[in-house]
Structures are given as C-alpha cells and as structure tokens.
Image (cartoon, helix red, strand yellow):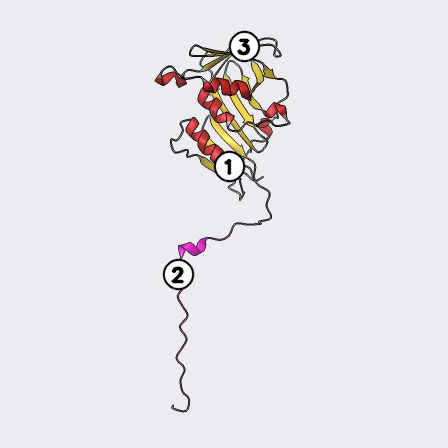
Amino acid sequence: MATVNVYRNKLKAASRFMAVQDIRFYLNGVLIESNELQSRIVATDGHTLFASRDDAKGDNEGSFVGIIGADTVKAILAWKAPYKSANDTPVVLTTSDDLAGEHRAEWCGNVCIFRLIDGKFPDYMRVVPATLDAGISFFQPEYLLRCTKAAQDLNTSAKGMFAFKCAQDGAGIAVFSSEAFAVLMPIKTTVADVADVAWAREALPAPVVDAPVVDAVAA
C-alpha cells in the first residue's frame, strides 16, 4: 500500500492534455508516479504532453505507478471547495497492494473509490527534449490554447502566460514553472522557412522619381 499526495490544480492542468476516447486506452487518463521523495503527474494524447512534479513533504509513503482514468480525474475535479484555501490541500490517494484492486481518493471530506487503467503508459521521458535551440516549428493553435488554460489552472499567470522554446527536433516546450511544463509535437509542413520580417524595421520605400527629360533641340 502507498500514500500519494497530488494537487487538484495540477490534475486539472494535466486533464487538458490526456486523450479522449482514444483507441490507445492507456492514454485516456493521467499517469501518477510517486515515492517518498516526489510525486509526478503526466498526461499525453500523443500530440501534446504535460508533466508536473511536487516534492514530498514527508506525507508520501511507499512507491506507486499507475494510470488514473479520465472519469476518476473528472470526478475529483468536480468536488466543490468547502473553503477558499482548500485547493492548497492535496488530494490523498491511498493505493492497494493489488494494483488491479480498488483504490481511494480523499479531499476535504470527499471520497472516491476507483480502479486503475490496466495498461502501460508511454515512456514520457524519451519525449522531453534534452536541449532547446530555438529552432523553427509550426504548431496547432489549439495546442497553444491548452497551454494557456494550463497556466491559468496552475496559477502561474492569471492571463495564461508561459515561456516557450523549440528543440532541435521541432518539439516545443511550454514552461509554466520549475514544477510543470508541456511538450508540443510540431505540425509536418512543406514550408521550409519563415518569411523574413526585417522590412518592418525600415521606413516605407521612397517612390522613384523620374529624372526630367531635356529637349535636345531647344538646347
């Protein structure tokens, strides 16, 4: 048995990146990884990926790896906060030694009994770029909107702002904080480069004025 502490704002942000009724059923939820030192939440739909971490405060017990289904995530997020600072209180997951058995989620008097998705989550660490070099990539606007909403969920910016940079392989990284980020897969396109915008640093081109014509006879 393990005890895992996760926060609802990070669950909410992660839920924006999990798959919806995907044939790859193991993507229809969020991955929870936890030990006595740290907890992580990861979600992906194959095009975008979200990952967050929380260092344990002495409240995690044992080790746990499992996929919590979308229905369970939505149920936890639907709980109403009984007081203003309730969202600073973690959701406590009490897991069974039998991963195929029943598990328990508790938060501010709310309780949910759930089962894990029986599947293997992708190796998300392979997707995270090792270096960022500000390369040129093209992305679906909807993916960027997810990042805006995730930034608001995480309270890193009321306006949904986040830092963004591209890796050599074209993947984009949206960084919300030192504890949370998203990876965006680029769109395949035939456009080889981005149009030059240096023209906007210069004044309007001056019209060409024709030289006056001199009458050779009159001269």
Location of residue 185 (image quadrant): top right
Q: Are marks 2 and 3 in contact (CB under 8 Å)?
A: no
Q: Residue furthest bottom?
A: 217
Which residues are drawn in magenta?
A: 195-216
In percent of width and height, residue 13 lies at: 47, 26
In percent of width and height, residue 27 lies at: 59, 25
Looking at the rendered structure, the kind of residue marked 1 is Glu
User: Which element type, helix, strand or loop, lies under badge 1?
Assistant: helix
Q: Residues within 10 Å of mark 1 (few under 14, many from 20)?
A: few
Residue position for label 3: 2
Name which of mark 1 and mark 3 comes first in the sequence. 3
Residue 25 part of the magenta-drawn span: no
| 28 and 139: which is toward the camera | 28
Residue position for label 1: 142
For the point 55% across and 11% down, the residue is 103
Residue 196 part of the magenta-drawn span: yes
Report the Cα–Cα distance between label 2 and label 1.
Answer: 35 Å
Report the Cα–Cα distance between label 2 and label 3.
Answer: 68 Å
Looking at the rendered structure, the kind of residue marked 3 is Ala
For the point 40% across and 72% down, the residue is 209
In percent of width and height, residue 134 lies at: 51, 41
Q: Main secondary structure of the magenta part?
A: loop
